[in-house]
Amino acid sequence: MTTSRYLPLGALAAGLLVLPWLLPNSFYLDLAIRMAINAIIVLGLNLLIGFAGQISLGHAGFLGLGAYASAVLPTHFGWPPLAAMLAGMALTGVLAALVARPIFRLKGHYLAMATLGLGIILNIVVRNEAQWTGGPDGMPVLPFEVAGLTLSRDWHWWWLVSALLLLSVWMAQNLMDSPFGRALRALHGSEVASRGVGVDVAGYKVAIFVLSAMFASLMGSITAHYVGFVTPNVADFFHSIELVTMVVIGGMASVYGSLLGAVLLTALPQLLATFEGWETVVFGAILMLCMIFLPKGLAPTLAARFGKGGQ
Amino acid sequence: MALLEVSELSIQFGGVKAVQAVSFSIDAGMIYAVIGPNGAGKTTLFNLITGVYAPTAGSIRLDGQPVHGLTPDRLAQRGVARTFQNLQVCMNMLAIENVMVGAHLRLDRSLFKAALRWPALRRADAALRDEAAELMRFVGLAQYLTARADSMPYGALKRLEIARALAMRPRLLFLDEPAAGLNPKETQEVDALVRRIADAGVTVVLVEHDMKMVMNLSERILVLDYGKKLAEGNRDEIRRNPDVIAAYLGAHA
Ligand SMILES: Nc1ncnc2c1ncn2[C@@H]1O[C@H](COP(=O)(O)OP(=O)(O)OP(=O)(O)O)[C@@H](O)[C@H]1O
Ligand SMILES: [Mg+2]
């Protein structure tokens, strides 16, 4: 995965570059931007779930933290958006570390339950603190501006998100092919063996959980500024499940699988809109079929069929 | 001074006294064997010394320093490496990556440098890959240099664990039944491999049921039975010891 990895990365860059010219109207550009945003979030989540073998069912809570930091701090306290974004990430990082330290001593389901609980608590907080957050109705978010430049047109957002996506793919691949990443993958493969060679297993789990959460917070902020409005739904349990599903459908421990899962599951509800009222059922059925016939996820299955490595 | 000094070591699981007041010491540079019937407490003894379990009583000293109660990653820092009776290979990785993980403590583990593809870190990683390949050749896995771990046969995975342990550059290496499940030819190769490891200056502690291999390799032998030390001595002493003959041959012949 050393020399050949720049080929897919280059293809991705080229695709992102020409895509806006191929799209018929702004509806599709909006869809593409949301796909790219989800792809970055899912990539961050896949580092945790697919590579390190840990689960988070509360990731939307971290997205929500970032989104509301970017909504509340500039609106109520006059913070510059960039500062609010960084503050959101820092807050998320601290919170994730505080939660992760005790629970990573436990195994398996406890982490799922704890992250689930955390997500629900964050969701309830934003619903109840109406004077700051607008409660269930949500609140508007000021435009993103830095150094006198304002991101307003969809084009701007597309370039920003594309650049972030390319950077994320590149960094995720670098990370997983490094001592840090190998330790993460090793503790997924065998905790006993990893400890035996000196890996501080709990420390690595905390590190990747915090990193993944801060990543989600960053993308929550970006989503909030892009949409210009934030509601508690961003931190919803179902959103967390949706993100995990994207990881699983695309392919655990697969960088490009993350992108594939995000793109497909962001598009699917649009495609299913014609089923009027039954889209959720069809959505569920598709997911079930995927899990039965492609238990490893799309990208690894396709890669295996065409005889490639799958990362 | 002995490299490893174990004294009155005990652990109990519920009512089971898996290891009871076992004492022995190992000098640097030797091959030391621990034998005994199934369930005698050999693996448990390894788990105690490598920090997987904390003893309920007794002490373990490495170079005179007490190390009982330290976690496995701390013991790894002090040069203690091991392989596992029930394979512990990372099946989600390439074979060579499994070996590279063995060098974990010697590497720059910075997250930021890794994400940014820091040149020094890349260079160190490339050198490590060569070193891991060399180790794989050393243990006889030359044909698996590009293989995925989950595509390798059992006998090869046993050696892969040895290569990973060697990547730690250990002073003290614990091998828990390295020849179990291997055919006679493979067993002979492992026998020769253990000899070469010891010749390279690594102190080896070996648990093995293959008596030919034990008698061929070991300078000293500890015999456990029902968690207790039945005997300890060089191969001739052990061969002649009536208790050992009674317990061991009684269980095996
Ligand atoms: N974690 C544990 N919990 C409870 N009992 C245990 C545990 N580990 C080992 N034992 C018990 O301790 C005793 C010694 O087991 P151990 O695995 O050390 O034997 P062994 O000498 O390695 O045997 P073998 O030759 O079959 O590998 C057995 O009775 C076993 O059931
Ligand atoms: Mg055993």
Image (tube, rainbow, N blue to C red):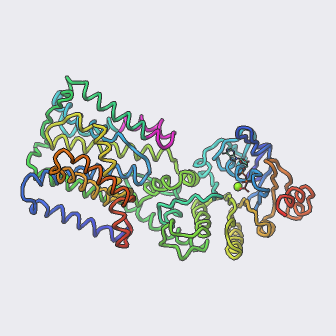
Q: Position of residue B70 (x, y in %)?
A: 63, 43
Figure quadrant of the C terminus of chain A: bottom left
Magenta segment includes B35: no
- Tell me where the magenta segment starts and ends, as one range: A93-111
* Residue A232: quarter of image: top left
Q: Is residue B175 left or right of residue A232?
A: right
Picture mark count: 0
Q: Position of residue B122 (x, y in %)?
A: 40, 63
Q: Position of residue A42 (x, y in %)?
A: 30, 51
User: In the image shown, does B221 or B11 lie closer to the viewer?
Assistant: B11
Farthest residue to the top: give it: A131
Farthest residue to the left: give it: A25
* Residue B167: quarter of image: bottom right
Q: Is residue B15 above or below residue B49?
A: above
Residue found at x 79% / y 56%: B37
Q: Position of residue B213 (x, y in %)?
A: 76, 69
User: In the image shown, does B235 or B63 lie closer to the viewer?
Assistant: B235
Residue found at x 39% / y 38%: A115
User: In the image shown, does A101 or A134 lie closer to the viewer?
Assistant: A134
Q: Is residue B153 left or right of residue A290?
A: right
Q: Is residue A145 left or right of residue B110?
A: left
Q: Is residue B237 visible?
A: yes
Figure quadrant of the N terminus of chain A: bottom left
Q: Is residue A171 visible?
A: no
Instruction: Give the dominant element type of the magenta stretch: helix, strand or loop.
Output: helix
Residue found at x 22% / y 53%: A268
User: In the image shown, does B230 or A113 lie closer to the viewer?
Assistant: A113
Q: Is residue A85 above or below residue A76?
A: below
Magenta segment includes A106: yes
